[in-house]
Image (spheres, rainbow, N blue to C red):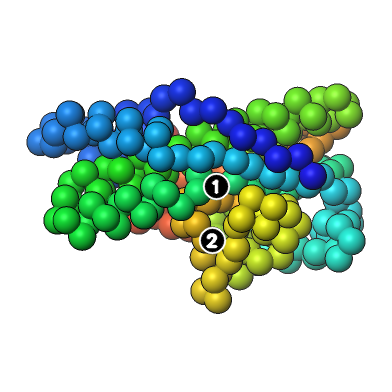
Amino acid sequence: MPIYYPRLTTIDLDETKRYAGLGGKADFSATLLTEACTQAQLLATPKGVWQIYTYDQDSHTIMSPMPLNLTAEGIIRHLAGAAEVAVMAVTIGISLEQEVSNLFSKNQYTLGLLLDAAGTTAVEMTCDAVCYVISGQAARSGLTTGRRFSPGYGGWPVEVQPEILDLASGSAIDLSVTDTKMLVPRKSVTAIIGLYPYHQALGLNHEQVLSCDKCGQPDCQARKETNT
């Protein structure tokens, strides 16, 4: 059960603007944006954990000690051709969201909003760092990795969150899930990554790249524009 502690040397300003829903707006304080990203870097405690399991293509089952059968079409299609899967969980801890609540209680709403968005950026950067390590581990086994796919996206019901968190050993990094299937701390992510033989990876289709136009949440503030 590897536990990885990425180091975030910076928090992406442009991504934070996007997560805050600012887009191309110029009527906000660039100073506050920089302050929020700096605070996020100081408050975040990034860590990730993952487990790798054999994946049965015929039954769409993750062959863990308690096998998990996948039934949602989106994740089944996404994992087509995978020989194994990495089930991952990441978090940046609870300190940042506590500071967001503190800022809101002081009516510092703009800074609170930007800090919350910077926290989302930090989580995504942590996911990328963990995925990079998983990719290296897979390569040593002669496999290559696909894109990550999370419960709640692309038609995969969030109700599976407890099982995915358990498969990832999320409790090892102090992650839990509420009765409404939300992760605690809030700035956390679980996901599955398909691991493919190199010859199989050459044939990965577009459906296995989870772009925003494939997701069922069109009102998501993190939604990226796609070119057609």
Local crowd size for mark 1, using a 10 Å CA cut-off: few (<14), some (14–19), many (≥20): many
Is residue 11 rendered to the left or right of residue 24? right
Q: Nearer the viewer, residue 175 or 162?
A: 175
Q: Amino acid at mark 2?
A: Leu
- Most extreme residue toward the bottom, as rendered? 179
Asked if residue 160 lies left or right of residue 62, the reply is left
| Residue drawn where x is 25% and y is 49% of the image | 112
User: Which amino acid type is shown beneath numbered disc 1?
Assistant: Thr
Residue 26 % position (x, y): 13, 32
Q: Nearer the viewer, residue 211 or 227?
A: 211
The location of residue 109, given as percent across then percent down, is 18, 52
* Residue 198 vertical position relative to residue 216 in the rendered view, above or below: above
CA distance separating discs 2 and 1: 9 Å
Please state if 172 lies on the left or on the right of 178 as rendered.
Answer: right
> 187 above or below 124?
below
Which residue corresponds to mark 1? 91
- Is residue 59 something that shows in the picture? no
Looking at the image, which residue is at 54% across and 56% down?
Answer: 153
Point out the tag, 2 or 1, that comes first from the N-terminus.
Answer: 1
Q: Are marks 2 and 1 in contact (CB under 8 Å)?
A: yes
Crowdedness near tag 2: few (<14), some (14–19) or many (≥20) residues, C-alpha within 10 Å: some
Q: Tell me if I can see residue 137 in this picture.
A: yes
Q: Residue at x 16, y 56 (%)?
A: 106
Tell me residue 103's x, y (percent).
23, 52
Q: Quadrant of the C terminus?
A: top left
Q: Which mark is residue 183?
A: 2
